[in-house]
Image: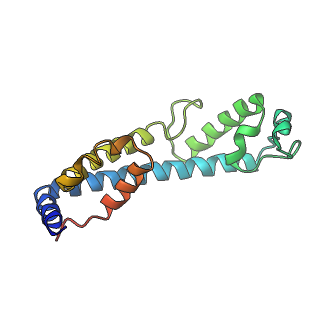
């Protein structure tokens, strides 16, 4: 165990600049994505609060007992009719634009770019963090980028790693 700690310290020192840069890039990408997601959610809920979109009758056989009531939470926007959903997406697009999100089409998700940027930043950060991992664990972590929830846990632990000492 002591040898692994020494190897970790040595590798951390060797890759410190690259690690810190990739971690900062990840934090910036995450902040961008979370900001866009928040503005999108606020826009959708604003549209739902100021319009009357009902739960579709097609969902009543799936234990949705809200037929005829109005949808007020964007987490349930998939429960409206296709016709209402098209109108809703158009209104959401206009509201997102008013709030400063530049999404080229109402058919695109607001995070269509930020999600990709976030995943690329995660991948780069994971690659750099793997350079620091002691060689004994390298084989076990080989496919970590495609293993969920292992990827999330490795990312979380790597973000906490102190490369200073």
Marker count (numbered): 0
72 horizontally vs 66: left or right: left
Quadrant including the C terminus: bottom left
Q: Outermost residue toward the right? A: 68
Q: Examine the image and state in which quarter residue 113 appears.
A: top left
Q: Nearer the viewer, residue 15 or 89?
A: 15
Q: Examine the image and state in which quarter residue 108 appears.
A: top right
Residue at image x 19%, y 50%?
131
Residue at image x 87%, y 42%?
67
Percent coordinates x, y for residue 152 in the rendering: 41, 52
Q: Is residue 78 above or below residue 125?
A: above
Q: Nearer the viewer, residue 60 or 79?
A: 60
Quadrant including the N terminus: bottom left
Q: Is residue 62 above or below residue 22?
A: above
Residue at image x 41%, y 38%?
116
Percent coordinates x, y for residue 133 in the rendering: 21, 55
125 horizontally vs 3: left or right: right
> How does the figure colour the protein chain or chains?
rainbow
17 horizontally vs 113: left or right: left
Percent coordinates x, y for residue 142 in the rendering: 28, 43
């Amino acid at each position: 165990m002591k040898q692994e700690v020494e190897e970790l310290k040595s590798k951390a020192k060797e890759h410190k600049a690259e690690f810190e840069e990739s971690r900062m890039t990840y934090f910036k990408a995450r902040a961008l994505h979370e900001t866009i997601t928040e503005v999108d959610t606020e826009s959708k809920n604003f549209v739902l609060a100021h319009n009357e979109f009902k739960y579709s009758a097609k969902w009543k056989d799936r234990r949705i007992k809200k037929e005829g009531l109005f949808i007020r939470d964007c987490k349930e926007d998939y429960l409206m009719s296709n016709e209402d959903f098209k109108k809703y997406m158009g209104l959401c697009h206009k509201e997102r634009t008013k709030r400063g999100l530049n999404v080229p089409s109402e058919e695109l998700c607001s995070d269509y770019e930020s999600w990709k940027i976030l995943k690329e930043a995660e991948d780069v950060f994971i690659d750099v963090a793997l350079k620091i991992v002691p060689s004994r664990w390298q084989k076990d972590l080989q496919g970590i980028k495609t293993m969920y929830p292992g990827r999330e846990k490795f990312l979380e632990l790597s973000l906490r790693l102190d490369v200073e000492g």
